[in-house]
Amino acid sequence: MSICGTAALAPGRIIAAAAGLDLLTDAALREEAKADFRRCRGDRPRVSPLPASRTQPPRVPPHLVRPGEGDDVSALQPPG
């Protein structure tokens, strides 16, 4: 264990959260990320780690489940 403990991880968490927020709020950045992903991945199909009978991971709160396709997450709201 380092002297700093988990405090040394705080900047990384902030940077990761900021990058996630940028992806959620910037449609152009999402399109760039998708294009980069397609370029790196090529034509290989995506294989889901979930069994075919399961449509979402277990224990996902209902307010985070949104049926349909697309990137719009603006409608997701916490309960209450």
Image (cartoon, grey):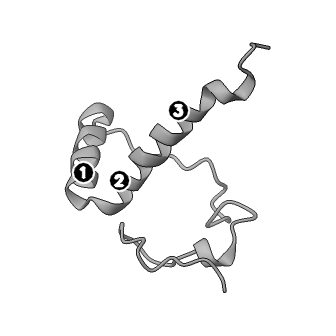
Q: Is residue 43 left or right of residue 62?
A: left
> Measured from the top left, where is residue 43 in percent x and y?
29, 40
> Measured from the top left, where is residue 45 in percent x and y?
39, 44
Q: Earlier in the sequence, mark 1 or mark 2?
A: 2
- For marks 2 and 3, give the CA distance: 17 Å
Residues marked 1 and 2 touching at CB (< 8 Å) = yes
Q: Secondary structure at mark 2?
A: helix
Q: Which residue is mark 2?
A: 23
Q: Assign the C terminus to one quadrant of the image.
A: bottom right
> Measured from the top left, where is residue 37 in percent x and y?
31, 40
Q: Is residue 41 left or right of residue 10?
A: left
Q: Quadrant of residue 9?
A: top right
> Measured from the top left, where is residue 79 in percent x and y?
65, 82
Q: Which mark is residue 29?
A: 1
Q: Secondary structure at mark 1?
A: helix
Q: Quadrant of residue 1?
A: top right
- For marks 1 and 2, give the CA distance: 6 Å
Amino acid of disc 1: Leu
Residue at horizontal 49%, vertical 47%?
Answer: 17
Residue at horizontal 75%, vertical 14%?
Answer: 3
Q: Which mark is residue 12?
A: 3
Q: Which mark is residue 8?
A: none
- For marks 1 and 3, give the CA distance: 20 Å
Q: Is residue 9 left or right of residue 14?
A: right
Total marks in image: 3
Amino acid of disc 2: Leu
Residue at horizontal 61%, vertical 77%?
Answer: 78
Q: Earlier in the sequence, mark 1 or mark 3?
A: 3
